[in-house]
Image (cartoon, rainbow, N blue to C red):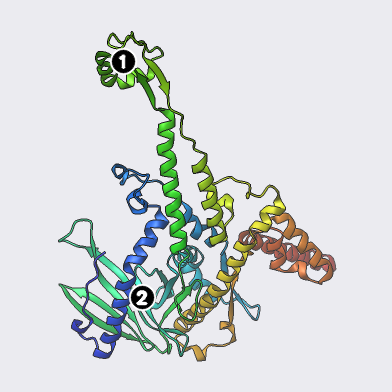
Amino acid sequence: MEFDIKPTSIVGFPSNEATKLQQLVDVFNAHKVDNAIKEEYYDGQISLNEVNIGIALPSDLKNLRVSCEWATKTVDVLAARSMFDGFVSIKGTENKTLNAIAKNNNLVTAYKAACKDELKFGCTFATLSADKAIKCKIKFHSPQTAAALWNGEKDRIDCGFAIIDTVPDESKENTYTVSHINYYTDKAIWEIIRKDGTWEAYEHKHAMGRPLMEPLVWNKTSAKPFGRSRIKSTVRGLVDGHIRTIANATIGLEFATSPQKYLLGVTDEQYESLINNKFKAYVGSLLTATNNPDSDKQPQFGQLAQGSLQPHIDMMRMLATQFAAETGLSVTDTGVINDANPTSSDAILAQSKTLVSLAEELNSGNGDALEHIARMALAIAENKSLDELDETADVIAHFKNPAMPNVASTADAAIKLASVRSNFADTDVFLEMVGFGPADIARIKAQEQRARGLALIEDIDADIN
């Protein structure tokens, strides 16, 4: 994707905003290569040429690709435990406006993809805008299509931009060029559109008092407010080592399949015959040779010892153990079996504690970001500022338990709670804990209400009669 823009040449764009946009473009371009590398590792598109250290692997195999899903699992296994389930009002009341916005934007599904981008690159960005049909549109953008500047004093985004649309580049085949970006500030959203080779800016003011852009950040530090990627250099190094080991093991297996043989003391004619028919000599069940008339000695046949694959297996086990320690995943997730693999349910649970802790940390940070997004969405939908929102806008992002307990254990806990806490069995939380989904809960409550209505009618008929 080609992105060439000079902010100072944008028609109708203020010079002070052009300066900030240029900073954003510089940030975007500075991280472009690193983000592309992380995407390659996530997709498993790493060739031997990129990991070869030039000793055991022949250069003729430099374009050979060995699939490795370790970087993918580094992201996906943790993201799978961050299960956003919608918003819950602090007051316990339903906010129909927010629920409608979340549903119309497929927010639960969109979050799953955004969470993977967040872990892959270190952060991802949510942008908001007014929409006549659904009141507020929410979109997520990875750092491959967006950038932002951080305001340390306000502890939030100072400004940012996101690529909205692209068009085919007529000068280059299979290449797209940016045609539309949005630039977000405290007071406005600037639509910057390319028309006939010229960039033009259109201002849409708002009263939010902050950019309509919110980051979801993983592993944030004071030095890195936009977080750090799960596919960091140490993880990539372990992936490189695994690819090299698999390649070496594959080559070793080829030699083990066709072991080196030798035949000493043959005549020139016999030598030429063997050289010209190597494969036939290898697969033939019978190899014959007469005495060498020059030396009057019988040819001697032998076979070199086969190389062992055990060193490669040991290396894979070592790399898998290091990878598990680095990422918080279990050794089982790498697909390598060794003595570190758990043998009981208790051992499996103990090995997943680190991953559960990471998921809880992820949910905590993303929960705060989603609550900011929800409040801004309500302000846009109700055409208010954040300060003008009432208490119904105080919501909490709800996540399912990252430990993923089985239904039997949660149901048992729910029943025990209901025995000591009155009316708990009448709540939706109780039904969720015993294993019912939102659709089942809605049906249960509707049928219970219908049953109560029929009972009331029967009581009234009985009193009349």
Query: In the visual, does 353 lie left or right of 184?
Result: right
Judge by depth and name the residue closer to the eye, 257 or 171: 257
Residue 147: numbered disc: 2
Query: Which residue type carries mark 1?
Result: Val
Residue 383's place in the image compared with 49, above or below, is below
Judge by depth and name the residue closer to the eye, 80 or 245: 245
Q: Residue at x 43, y 59 (%)?
A: 236
Residue 462's place in the image compared with 270, above or below, is below
Q: Can you give x and y, in whole percent of width and height, for residue 445 in the image?
A: 68, 64
Q: Residue at x 74, y 62 (%)?
A: 451
Query: In the visual, does 171 lie left or right of 464?
Result: left
Count residues near mark 2 (Cα–Cα under 10 Å), then give few for <14, some for 14-19, many for 20+.
many
Quarter assignment of residue 204:
bottom left
Q: Specify the quadrant that holds the N terminus.
A: bottom left
Q: Can you give x and y, in whole percent of width and height, for residue 238 in the image?
A: 47, 56
Mark 2–mark 1 distance (CA, rounded to whole Å): 72 Å
Residue 269's place in the image compared with 317, above or below, is above
Residue at image mark 1: 266
Q: Can you give x and y, in whole percent of width and height, for residue 411 in the image?
A: 74, 59
Residue 277's place in the image compared with 317, above or below, is above
Query: Which residue type carries mark 2?
Result: Ala
Quarter assignment of residue 40:
bottom left
Query: In the visual, does 461 lie left or right of 115?
Result: right
Badge 2 marks a residue whose secondary structure is: strand
Q: Can you give x and y, in whole percent of width and height, for residue 225 in the image?
A: 46, 79
Q: Specify the quadrant that holds the C terminus.
A: bottom right
**Residue 46 visible in the displayed image:** no
* Disc 2 to disc 1: CB gap under 8 Å: no
Q: Residue furthest front?
A: 295
Badge 1 marks a residue whose secondary structure is: loop
Sooner in the amino-acid sequence: mark 2 or mark 1? 2
